[in-house]
Image: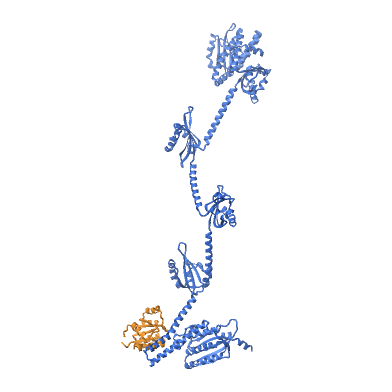
Chain colours: A orange, B blue
Amino acid sequence: MANRRILVIDDEDGIREIIQICLEAVAGWQVFTAASGSEGLINAQSTLPDAILLDVMMPDMDGPTTFRRLRANVITQDIPTILLTAKAKISEQQQFINLGVTGVITKPFKAQDLVDQMRIILGWKD
Amino acid sequence: MLTLFVSTAQVSTTSVIASYYSGLSLTLFVLVYYLLTRQVAKLKQAEAACRDLYNNAPCGYYSITEDGAIIAINDTALRWLGYAREEIIGKIKISDLLVPEDLELRDVVGQFLVQTFVKEQELHLLRKDGTVLPALINATIVKDAQRGTVIRTSFFDITERKLIEEALRQTNEALEVRVGQRTSELTEVIDRLQRELFQRERVERALREGEERWQLAIRGTNDGIWDWNLKTDQVFFSSRWKEMLGYQEEDIGTTSKEWRQRVHPDDLEQVLQSCQDHITGRTSFYVSEHRLLCKDGSYKWILARGQALWDQKGDAIRLTGSHTDISEAKAAAIQRKQAEEALRKSQEQLQAILDYSPAVIYLTDTEHRYKLINRKFESLFNTTSVEILGKSVDEVWVPEIAEVFVRNSQQVIDQGMPLEVEEFASHEDGLHTYRSIKFPLYDANGVPCAVCGISTDITDVCDELRLRKIAEAERAKLIAILEATPDIVGTIDLNEKIHYLNSAARQIFGFEENKDCVNFTLANVQPEWSYEIVRNEGISTAMRDGVWVGETAFLSHDGHEIPVSQLIVAHKSADGNVNMFSTIARDITQQKQISATLFEAERRWRSLLDNVYLVVVGLDQQGKVEYANHCFLELVGYSKNEVIGQDWIKTFLPTHQQKQMQNNLAELWSQEFNTHHHNVILTKSGEERVIAWNNTVLQDLQGNVIGTLSIGEDITERQVIERMKEEFISVVSHELRTPLTSIHGALNLLSSDLVDIKSDKGRRVLEIAAESAERLVRLVNDILELERLESGKISLSKQVCQASQLLEKATEMMQVMANRAGITLLVSSMPIQFNADSDRIIQVLTNLLGNAIKFSARDTKIWLTVELGNRELLRENGVRELSVVSGSELPMVLFKVQDQGRGIPEDKLESIFERFHQVDASDSRKKGGTGLGLGICRSIVQQHGGRIWVESTLGEGSSFYFTLPGQQLDDENHGK
């Protein structure tokens, strides 16, 4: 299934763009982006992606809050969501896992590694 | 006449007169003899003389006819019977004179007719007054030529004799018999003499016989004879009289003086009185016992008896009598009397001994019957002699006790030896112990007839002995304890002389034996200061209160001072006065050291706790504050008094924590409680302070929790800083990672040929990487700069600056950006000089301008102005405070950057100057900037001694101000 659809929510323009290019180039997935949590909630509901990459540290609405809002919405509640965080501490990552996210990927990352990690986390073979 | 009497007496052979009968008989005899002698001498004197004799004879005479008629009677008889002669003669018959009982004697009288005479017939004659006269009659029948048969009767008044007879009979029966015999002999003599009176031829012979008898009687009785002529005071003293007193015949004269001067002076008065009594007729006889002086100077007891002779007128003319030596009888009597007296006294003493003996004394016979008990016996056993005497021991005592008594008594009887033994007797309060001595008493034959017992109650003594033994054992025990104790124990008397020291004390003072210390006093064993305390305080207190305790010291034998805790006890004698002191003292050298160490440790800790800049709080088990140090009090703003005793939780914990802490408290203390924890406490003003506690549980000796001691640090500020630091690091790491992530990702894409670098996408990726790198550099620069500024590592290179130049330069730098944003920069400057690092001020200005441009909408204006203002001016402009050098009135250079942007909320007016604090976090992404710009600005301004602040109204715009101190140069300009 080559035509997977991914929603990337990150306030950093550069990062958002790099991830988009990365996923499109490496995995050939279709990427949607959102520059804030609230924008992401709207996008997720409208595009219903196969997975969401959600940055943790964002102004206004941070990653965990956005995630809880996604889970609270019947439409988006089942979308696998991976948190992107610059925080390397295991304890902090565990906090996110505890929230119920599908997985956590730390920044920075290599392009191939990002795709590989996503596949592992999401259980995608292709 | 006396000579004749004597010579006649010497030749007389027959008359014997008993001395005890002498009074009457002798007188009679003498009288008769005298008359007779006269008759003989004058040879038949006239009848007148004879009548006179008849009438005055010391016996009564009367003559009766055969029919009982009285025909003659002498004067003596008339006097005795109380009749006058004419009342008798021819008028009264003899029967009228007889008492009725004697009337039958008429027949006796009648017999007179047939007999020649009646002899010694006792009759009772009736006196005229009716009284009875006992009389002894002798009667003779005389044939009278004229009157026919005449019975001539003589009689004696035997009243006296009767009395004497009775006395004699009582005194000496044997003598009575003899007297009786002699009386009869005398009677015979008298009869004979009477007969001789009537038969004159027989008179002489009869007289001679009488004289002889008398002499014999005198010799026989061994009496002395005296005859005192009261008229002439001539006295005849017989040889025997003289011999009796040891005198020779010629030694004694013939006057009464010879006798009187020899009477014992003590007896003389009584003797003369007796004489006088008799002579005057008050007594019938003269009888006297008195002492007479012997030739050898000694005195003899004499019994003197005599009879007086009275003349017709009743005057005594003679007193005649005998002396009997009664010295021996008297001595014997005295001796007997003395013996009796001694015996009586002895008995009295014995009785007194018995009566007052504290011991029980009793006598039992061989059958063990009580014969005697003393008063003690009666009182002790609550009985009486009447009750006890005659009863046997078995009857008096219970069998067990009686058995022992009998056995002991029997042993005494059997062995005839005294026995000392302990016995028991029952009392109301139980058995008493007696020490008894029992000894036998013997009868005349030397056979034991009784046992005397003397028993003393020694119950108390036994008890005392037993108690004394116990006391001695106790005492020995106590001494052993005293000797064994390591404490110093000793006694002193009131003179402070030492009497006893125990082993420990002897060792310390260097005495081998107790006796070695007798010459030592308190002053020898105590240092002067200690001695003063003991003397002035210790002993006087002990005297008053009985006991004293204090800290003193002793001197050891090597001069070492030993601190002791000393107890002094005053001991009182039986009279209640203190007579001794004892002391117990414990060496407290170690305790002293320990307490000194403890004191020092305590002092150090107190000092530490009070001075350390840590709060220290001690709580008791109830959670009440027991201790709080200065730092704590300062922190919470309470005084010590307000804190001590207060409930910790209620006073210092915020309400929402109280309940939880209350629950935890007990649990915490019971368990391991050496924890560190933070909590918030409330100060007096209600401020919350965060304290990091280090708690220690306080325990008593048994390990029981008695409280806690907590040392805490006020970490309120630190916590804020730490939070800030953490936040900063978090932000920094985020801010750094974000561009890094972009660069990393981009380069990875390019390097792995996932994106063709020459493609649009590739160029875009490269662009992103470059932008991110730039941002990263900027960020790092800002961070480093801020750090350097804040840590003072950057030194300002101050120089004189022109305000206008700086504004110009800054505007120039920002003009491009303003243009791009479509914003107009309006500059208004004044020619102001001041001292500053111009580059840094330009940096501040460009930063403020940059921010203003970023947050301003297109076609708006930004004003940049500078002016010189003083404090008043600034205040008018709403500036509350200026960071100016205090006290100086230096003018301030005031810069202002004013925009028409969206404005800043009230609550962010301060925080935007802090690092990474932007009004909107997303601003940094959209507007660029690191979030450190204002922080750098503030740091630069503050380094110049100025202040930066912002005033803003949302939707209308913001005005950033900063001031810089004016320059000294300006003052000079003013001066120009």
Query: Quarter of the image holding residue B60?
Result: top right
* In this view, B823 is above or below B542: below
The number of numbered badges drawn on the structure is: 0
Nearer to us in this view, B330 or A92: A92
| Residue B53 visible in the displayed image | no
Residue B894 lies, in percent from the top left, at 56, 87
Screen quadrant of the N terminus of chain B: top right
Quadrant (top left/top right/bottom left/bottom right) for the C terminus of chain B: bottom right
Residue B184 position (above or below residue B296):
above
Place of residue B799 in the rendered image (x, y in percent of width and height, measured from the top left): 57, 87
Which residue is outermost to the left?
Answer: A1
In-image side of B50 versus B67 (left or right): right
Q: Depth check: B297 or B700 in front?
A: B700
Horizontal and vertical percent position of residue B673: 44, 68
Give the image location of residue B837, x and y in percent: 55, 87
Q: Residue at x 53, y 33 (%)?
A: B350
Report whether residue B591 is seen. yes
Considering every residue shown, the one lying at the far right of the view is: B232
Front-most of residues B436 and B64: B436
Q: Who is closer to the viewer here, B105 or B300?
A: B300
In the displayed structure, B493 sits above or below B11; it is below
